[in-house]
C-alpha cells in the first residue's frame, strides 16, 4: 500500500518552507516473509532537506590562537550546502503519536582534531555515554550548554579522556573556552530511536519504522526547528522534502 501524498506549506517569521510526502515503490522489509505478520507492519521514510536561495555560504573562520598548528582559517561547518542546495547536518527525529518510543542508550565520541570538534553534529539517545578526547597536541576545553545552562566544562590536555552521561533530551551546544572562538559542535540528544542526520546531499533514510502516525522534527543549527506530521504506511516508502528559505538565516 503506497503512502498518501501530503503537502504542507508553512509561513513562519518570513521564512517559507515546503514539505511534501509523495508515494514511492512498495517497500518489503528484510525478513518479513518469515518473521510473521506483526513484523511486517513497518515502512520506510526517506527524504531530503534543502536550502533555497538566496543565501551566501559562510566564509572560513579566522584563527586567533595557535595559528602555527591550526592555520590562519578553518572551515565554517555551521552551514554546509551542496551544489544543488542539499543541507548537511540537519537532524531528523520521528516521535510516534500513539505511544512513546523506547530508546537504547549508546556510546558516542567527541574529539578535537586539528582545531575543530569532530563530528560537528551528531545524534545520541538519552542515557548515552559521551567520550571526550583530544587528538591535538594543544589544550582544548569542552564547554557544553543546553540553552543557557552549563552542563559541563572540561579541560582536555592531549592525555586526558573524560566520559559524561547525556541524561536529558535536547540540543547541547559545545564551544572551546581557551580562546579557540571558531570551534563549535552540537549533540542532539533524543528520546526516540527513529532518527537520522542528513548527508552531504541533504538526504536521509529511516528504515523499518513501525507503521503509524509520527510527529516529525527537523533541526539545524542555523535554521532552527521545523515540525510536521507524517504517516508511515505499512510496506511503503514515503518521501518527504523540506525546503528552508535562506532569506533570513540566523
Image: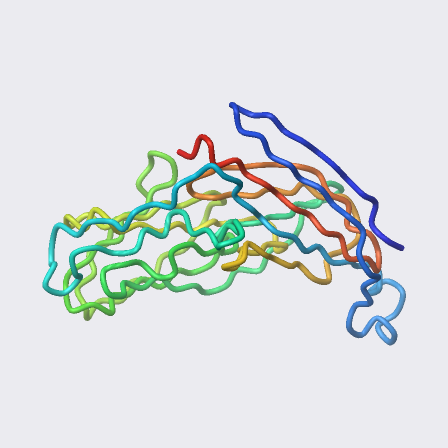
Q: Quadrant of residue 242?
A: top right
User: Looking at the figure, which quarter contains the N terminus?
Assistant: bottom right
- Asked if residue 66 lies left or right of residue 103, the reply is left
- Residue ID at (64%, 59%): 205
- Residue ID at (52%, 37%): 225
Q: How many marks?
A: 0
- Residue ID at (53%, 49%): 190
Question: Of all residues shown, which one is farthest toward the top?
Answer: 13
Q: Which one is nearer the viewer's eye here, 238 or 123?
A: 238
Residue 79 lies, in percent from the top left, at 41, 47
- Residue ID at (35%, 64%): 131
- Asked if residue 245 lies left or right of residue 135, the reply is right
* Colour mapping used in the image: rainbow
Residue 39 lies, in percent from the top left, at 82, 65
User: Looking at the figure, which quarter contains the C terminus?
Assistant: top left
Q: Quadrant of residue 148?
A: top left
Q: Is residue 203 above or below residue 54?
A: below
Residue 88 lies, in percent from the top left, at 48, 53
Q: Which one is nearer the viewer's eye here, 2 or 105?
A: 2
- Asked if residue 181 lies left or right of residue 21, the reply is left
Q: Which one is nearer the viewer's eye here, 7 or 176?
A: 7
Q: Is residue 212 above or below residue 10?
A: below
Residue 183 lies, in percent from the top left, at 26, 51
- Asked if residue 79 lies left or right of residue 106, the reply is left
Amino acid at each position: 500500500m503506497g503512502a498518501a501524498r501530503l503537502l504542507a506549506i508553512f509561513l513562519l517569521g518570513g521564512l517559507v518552507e515546503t514539505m511534501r510526502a509523495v508515494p514511492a515503490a512498495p517497500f518489503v522489509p528484510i525478513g518479513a516473509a518469515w518473521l510473521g505478520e506483526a513484523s511486517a507492519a513497518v515502512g520506510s521514510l526517506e527524504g531530503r532537506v534543502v536550502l533555497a536561495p538566496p543565501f551566501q555560504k559562510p566564509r572560513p573562520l579566522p584563527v586567533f590562537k595557535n595559528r602555527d598548528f591550526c592555520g590562519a582559517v578553518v572551515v565554517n561547518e555551521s552551514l554546509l550546502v551542496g551544489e544543488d542546495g542539499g543541507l548537511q547536518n540537519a537532524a531528523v527525529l520521528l516521535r510516534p503519536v500513539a505511544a512513546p518510543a523506547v530508546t537504547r542508550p549508546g556510546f558516542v565520541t567527541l574529539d578535537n582534531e586539528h582545531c575543530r570538534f569532530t563530528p560537528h553534529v551528531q545524534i545520541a539517545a538519552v542515557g548515552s555515554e559521551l567520550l571526550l578526547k583530544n587528538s591535538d597536541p594543544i589544550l582544548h576545553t569542552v564547554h557544553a550548554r543546553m540553552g543557557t545552562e552549563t552542563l559541563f566544562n572540561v579541560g582536555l590536555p592531549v592525555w586526558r579522556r573524560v566520559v559524561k552521561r547525556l541524561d536529558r533530551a535536547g540540543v547541547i551546544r559545545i564551544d572551546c573556552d581557551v580562546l579557540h572562538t571558531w570551534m563549535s559542535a552540537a549533540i542532539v540528544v533524543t528520546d526516540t530511536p527513529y532518527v537520522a542526520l542528513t548527508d552531504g546531499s541533504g538526504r536521509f533514510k529511516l528504515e523499518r519504522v513501525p507503521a503509524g502516525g509520527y510527529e516529525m522534527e527537523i533541526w539545524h543549527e542555523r535554521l532552527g526547528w521545523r515540525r510536521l506530521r507524517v504517516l508511515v504506511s505499512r510496506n511503503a516508502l514515503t518521501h518527504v522534502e523540506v525546503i528552508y528559505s535562506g532569506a533570513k538565516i540566523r
